[in-house]
Amino acid sequence: MQKNLSVEATGESEKPAYAALAAKIKEFGVNLGFSAVGITDAAVRRDAGRRLARWLDRACHGRMDYMAKNVDLRLFPEKLFPEVRSVVSVRLPYLPASAGAGECALTHPEVAAVARYAQGRDYHKVVRRRLQSLADAIRREIGVSGLGAPFVYRAFSDSAPVMEVEFACRSGIAWRGKHSLSVSREGSWHFLGELYTSLPLPPDAPAENRCGRCRRCIDACPTRAIGESGEVDARVCLSYLTIEWRGAIPIELRRALGNRIYGCDDCQIVCPWNRFAKTGDAAFTAQSELTGARLVDLFAWSEADFDARFSGSPIRRIGYECWLRNVAVALGNAGDAPEIRAALAARADDSSPLVREHVRWALDSFSIPFPVRPSLC
């Protein structure tokens, strides 16, 4: 029998104390820089499970095998953390102050376009450290209040099989947009994090979905990866192809890549709710190496340059070979110019077959007409 993961088993006399603790948790979270903190029980809704199963059955996860593994741990949180009774869900904004410059990079094909979330420090470590500080504050508060509740927890930020958007929606801090990302009244430029806790905290009301009839994200996707049902087919998503995929980028999608060398923000750029977004946490200030960086300069980096300049950055996880692959395609889309041809020719005999293949395509591509897309800037 599945154990009770709700707060119903909490005694009536204890409920006011746990309600007061929940209010304190939200106060602590805001003081730590989180833009929102919400609480829900640890049960995953059946419709969320069906949505995940349908997405996996259609193989929309591509080669992200980790999405198909440990499905039970996603759908039944108690299998990941047996003591869990409540989930504390948090948002941490990341919009860099130079966001406008990054947006306009799409209209300058010789300049690198990098997804905003990756322009600063690695969010996994930043969010988890903040969650650890939140857990420490909760422990201290339990001691001060005399509640005497056993408190064990686990902290996550895109680091385990956790239904992050599901818990964000149910805790009231966001809703699921049609691009599958979490959206709030302050937009979608944020990271999510969770504390699985043993505390029977009172849940918040779920968020109302406020996308309405808007479909701008669907229409803006360069490869039409976002389906009408709001599910993203990773196999044709530029973020997946430039970050998760380790093989050759499909030839038919290379033109759509444009100058995007790491991720794609198009669906978020056009979201009306992002008009209300504020500058994010200082930890995610854009690195100077990426602000207005020219593709030819990035393509000249050695592997040592790549490792040193992206130390502590999420970009480093794709590795040097895929970095060169991505930049080679972007150079092929940048337009025929002597400097670009010279940069590509310098790596025509690269030791990596993957890089060589994309360099050849880039050099051959200058004779292929480039489709003009509307500016997002």
Image (cartoon, grey):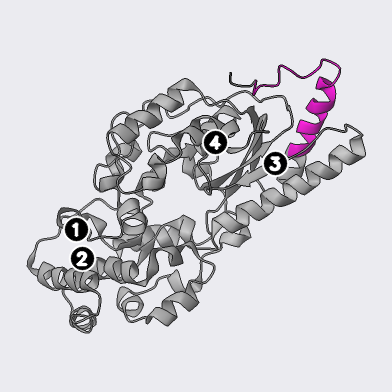
Q: Nearer the viewer, mark 4 or mark 2?
A: 2
Q: CA–CA distance between discs 4 and 3?
A: 29 Å
Q: Position of residue 176 (x, y in %)?
A: 46, 33
Horizontal placement of 122 versus 267: left or right? right
Is residue 299 positioned above or below 241 on the image? below
Task: Compare marks 4 and 3 and give the one earlier in the sequence.
Answer: 3
Could you tell me the amino acid type at mark 4?
Answer: Arg
Q: CA distance from mark 2 to mark 1?
A: 6 Å
Q: Which residue is mark 3?
A: 153
Residue bearing the label numbered 4: 185
Binning the other alpha carbons within 10 Å of mark 1 as few (below 14), some (14 to 19) or many (20 upward) gives: many
| Label 2, residues with CA under 10 Å away: few <14, some 14-19, many ≥20 | many
Say whether disc 3 or disc 2 marks the residue closer to the N-terminus: 3
Q: Is residue 11 magenta?
A: yes
Q: Secondary structure at mark 1?
A: helix
**Residue nearer the viewer, 54 or 70:** 70
Question: In the figure, residue 151 lies in which quadrant?
Answer: top right
The boundaries of the magenta stretch are 4-25
Q: Nearer the viewer, mark 3 or mark 2?
A: 3
User: Which residue matches tag 2?
Assistant: 333
